[in-house]
Image (cartoon, rainbow, N blue to C red):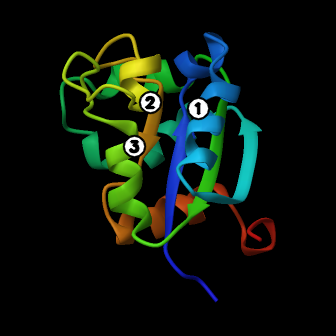
Amino acid sequence: MITNRTFTMIKPDGVENGHIGGILEKITSAGFKIVAMKYTQLSKRDAEAFYAVHSERPFFGELVEFMTRGPIVAAILEKDNAVEDFRALIGATNPAEAAEGTIRKLYATSIGENAVHGSDSDENAAIEGAFHFSGREIF
């Protein structure tokens, strides 16, 4: 039975800068259970589809280029109140505004290269998780 799940990605900058272990430690120490995880790289088509909601925004091309420049770690996390608790754990999009101890305060370098993605709603968590994982990959 699904309790409460959210989706996350450690973005290319987080991977490139060697922060996979530190980010996963923060996630598990905060009580999240990893129910699916993979190390992969988004194609241009994948990134355009995943971020389609932003396709009309001026930063869309730059976002797609950034998200395809290197590997990511995609994961589905489980915990009561998962979406809200994970958003608090990752902190504000702008690391300069993120609370002390949050993932983005610790590992992000800018608004654009902010180390990690976290779903913003239960509905988007389900959509984003299904984008990256088949049912047989989720435990």
CB under 8 Å between discs 3 and 1: no
Q: Earlier in the sequence, mark 3 or mark 1?
A: 1
Q: Disc 1 marks which amino acid?
A: Ile
Q: Which residue is mark 3?
A: 89
Toward the viewer: 137 or 27?
Answer: 27
Work out which quarter of the rendered image holds the C terminus and state it: bottom right
Look at the picture and state if 10 lies above or below 12. below
Q: Which residue is mark 2?
A: 103
Location of residue 132 (image quadrant): bottom right
Q: Nearer the viewer, residue 48 or 95?
A: 95
The N terminus: image quadrant = bottom right
Measured Cα–Cα span from mark 2 to mark 1: 7 Å
How far apart are the two marked residues, 3 and 1, measured between alpha carbons?
10 Å
Give the left or right position of residue 52, taking residue 45 as reference: left
Residue under numbered circle 1: 23
Q: At 40% from the left edge and 17% from the top edge, which residue is drawn? A: 113
Residue 111: give x, y in percent of width and height: 28, 19
Alpha carbons under labels 3 and 2: distance apart: 6 Å
On screen, residue 37 above or below 5 = above
Assess disc 2: are there few (<14), some (14-19) or many (≥20) residues with their C-alpha within 10 Å of its C-alpha.
many
- Secondary structure of the residue carrying tag 3 is helix
x, y percent for residue 47: 50, 37
